[in-house]
Amino acid sequence: MRNDASRPSAAPGTPAAWLILLQAARRVDAVTWLALSCVLAGWFLLDSLVVTAGPLQQSIRFYGLAALISNPLQLFSGIDAAHRSEVIVFALVCSVVLCAPLVPHAVALREAWLAYLAPLALMVACGVFLYVQTSGDFLAQPADNRGVAADVVHLANKILRRGSEPIARRVGVGAGAYLALAGSLLLAWRGISRYRAQPQQQGSAS
């Protein structure tokens, strides 16, 4: 009779994916957990961007950047209810990305260690998109660039750009961005190191 005592038994109704995820989490080392904790706190608990202008102080956390990329003016006014769905979806994306470093501990592939780069890649992508959005026009140009509407939009963009320049100087990077970046860099370094250390054909998951 085969002895299955050494294999963890799944509770009734427990999805196989969750069981694999739990098994992978047990193999994660303390340094990786520390880096993941830094990213988690930086993304969800601490502010990534802070605007301070006299008595006005507006802050945005990382999981709210999707709404900010959609409408950069929300950096000064706060995220409105119309963009709450974007915040929820992006928060779910951030949660999935945080689980990415568990993949190489569950999948016996050398390339799986590159999943450690996922948090850093997400932060870089958000930074690039945010820079592109904030450096362009606030209002979209109409299809007919020769009409009066085009002149009005151009004037409005010019006024908004000039008006936002003094406030933009008061936009600072919050502690959450620094903490998450430090954790992401540590994860990326460990992932690349483990990727290079693994043989071309990996026999079993680490």
Image (cartoon, rainbow, N blue to C red):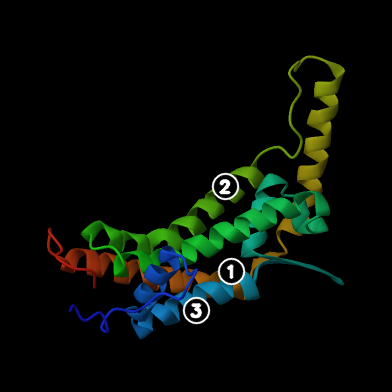
Q: Which residue is mark 3?
A: 37
Disc 3 packing (10 Å; few <14; some 14–19; many ≥20): some
Residue 18 shows in this picture: yes
Type of residue at label 2?
A: Phe
Identify the residue shown where x is 16% and y is 66%. 198
Query: Where is residue 107 drawn, in percent x and y?
Result: 28, 63
Query: Where is residue 33 drawn, in percent x and y?
Result: 42, 80
**Sequence order check, earlier mark of 1 and 2:** 1
Q: Are marks 2 and 3 in contact (CB under 8 Å)?
A: no
**Sequence order check, earlier mark of 2 and 3:** 3
In the image, 173 versus 41, the foreground residue is 41
Type of residue at label 1?
A: Trp
Q: Which residue is mark 1?
A: 43
Residue 155's image quarter? top right
Left or right side of 57 for 95: left
Residue 183's image quarter? bottom left
